[in-house]
Amino acid sequence: MFWDGTAAGELRIQRCTPCEKFYFYPRPYCPTCHSDQVEWQVVSGKGTLASYNINYRPFPIFETDEPQVIALIELDEGVRLMSNIVGVEPLPENLPLGMRVSVEFEPRGDQFLPVFTPESRS
């Protein structure tokens, strides 16, 4: 369901029906109340930058020698997931913690990987 969502341009996260908590990584039982009554929901794809690391080692599988920003994103729905920040020069001054971000989907092989970009400042 997660990868089906990314292929459709949607970020889908599991949510427990009884306690109404979202959680990530996917699993068959709620980590809060242990119910097996869980569902997939499309979420906003918006959140904040909670932490990051700039990786300068090449990622041959991504066919790039450019530095990659590996990030911990806290979604507005309350869950955290690992991803990448793209669309910004990978320098600490461009990556303030708490920065608002939104999801985009990049093709990587047969999958579409959720990555995050800084939200435009109006």
Image (cartoon, helix red, strand yellow):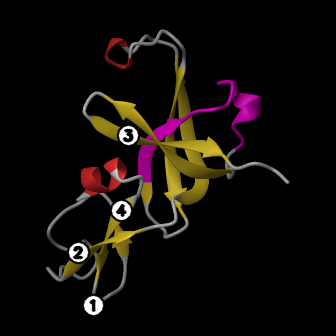
Extent of the magenta region: 81-96
Mark 2 or 4 closer to N-term? 4
Q: Residue at x 38, y 33 (%)?
A: 107
Q: Where is residue 50 in the image (x, y as percent from the top left)?
A: 57, 50
- Give the Cα distance between marks 1 and 3: 30 Å
* Residue occupying image coordinates x 69% and y 24%: 89
| Residue at the spot of label 1 | 18
102 lies left or right of 20 = right
Determine whether, in the image, residue 74 is placed left or right of residue 89.
left
Three-letter amino acid code at the position of disc 3? Leu
Categorize mark 2 by other alpha carbons within 10 Å: few (<14), some (14-19), many (20+). many
Distance between mark 4 and mark 3 Cα atoms = 12 Å
Quarter of the figure that contains the N terminus: bottom left
Viewer-side residue, 25 vs 116: 116
Mark 1 vs 4, N-terminal side = 4
Q: Which of marks 3 and 2 is nearer the N terminus?
A: 2
Q: Which residue is drawn at 35% across and 50% down?
A: 6
